[in-house]
Amino acid sequence: MRELQLSWNKAGDSGVKHLSSLLEDPNCKLEKLHLVNCSIGEEGFRALASALRSNPSHMRELQLSGNKAGDSGVKHLSSLLEDPNCKLEKLHLYNCSIGEEGFRALASALRSNPSHMRELQLSENKAGDSGVKHLSSLLEDPNCKLEKLFLYNCSIGEEGFRALASALRSNPSHMRELQLSGNKAGDSGVKHLSSLLEDPNCKLEKLDLHDCSIGEEGFRALASALRSNPSHMRELQLSENKAGDSGVKHLSSLLEDPNCKLEKLDLQRCSITDEGFRALASALRSKPSALRELWLYRNHPGPSAQQLLSELEKHPNCKRLQILGP
């Protein structure tokens, strides 16, 4: 047995305790365990952590999202993560009622044993700026090899974005996917993040900033940073921000850069009118485009802009482009 999928059941703490008796068996070679939404609380997390500390070297993926770990449950799990024999690569704790203290414990444990973790899903928790600052102390560790970090809806503001950007500038080359949607970055937070994106050592491929209170100045900063270092970004999620036509014009200057390799761009609900649509169309016609998906639902084009977009998909420089919306 290498993979066990038991998500969406009512295991509860008592069920997980029974399962833990398997995990601590030295002959158990389980590598992937999924227990999403299984009504597990602190006692279940304590039992799991204790069992895996007895037999830590095989487990590679642990999915525990949608349970009620709380800070105390995460502290038990952290005692596993800091074990030098723990080789866990993926940890999902989405919506697990984790606050600042839980983030502090996770960051401290992973700083003790940072080189294996590749994917960390911590979305829908109450990190706040202080929790993210603890996590940033891990990210700046040169031994940290994290490639995917998910922190959407984590109550992060400008200070948290500043801390993340600063940490990743210290150690930028491993991160490939950063999901930060539903936080309150604002233009100032995005400007801090842009200082990371323009670093030539930054290899980020996917960036999600959906619903992050970004306006024209934030779009200007993003576009400028990505023009400085355009060749890695493949997917940019910017929906439900206040780009407006002026913000989209800044972004269009990125799209016309011959080194831009962007394949998916999401601009849904971004207050774009005819002027912004014309700028996008002009940029995409100017060179053979790498773009494959352009999401434009819930904007405000007039009939002339809709005609322009229809013609754009037939343009020789946009042969593989699919326009979704408006």
Image: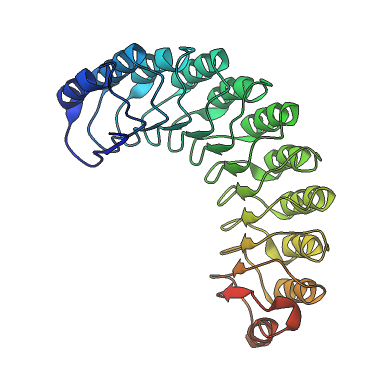
Occupied quadrant, residue 33 = top left
Can residue 19 be seen at all in this image of the molecule? yes
Q: Is residue 34 above or below residue 105?
A: below
Q: Is residue 294 above or below residue 108?
A: below
Residue 281 drawn at (x, y percent): 74, 76
Q: Nearer the viewer, residue 65 or 231?
A: 231
- Which residue is at a point 74% across and 82% down the rendered structure image? 316
Residue 206 drawn at (x, y percent): 62, 49
- Which residue is at a point 56% across and 42% down the rendered structure image? 180
- Which residue is at a point 48% across and 30% down the rendered structure image? 89
Residue 222 drawn at (x, y percent): 74, 50
* Quarter of the figure with the C terminus: bottom right
Q: Is residue 268 left or right of residue 304?
A: left
- Which residue is at a point 62% across and 30% down the rendered structure image? 160
Q: Is residue 163 left or right of residue 258?
A: left
Q: Is residue 191 above or below residue 51?
A: below
Can residue 213 be seen at all in this image of the molecule? no
Occupied quadrant, residue 272 = bottom right
Residue 16 drawn at (x, y percent): 21, 25
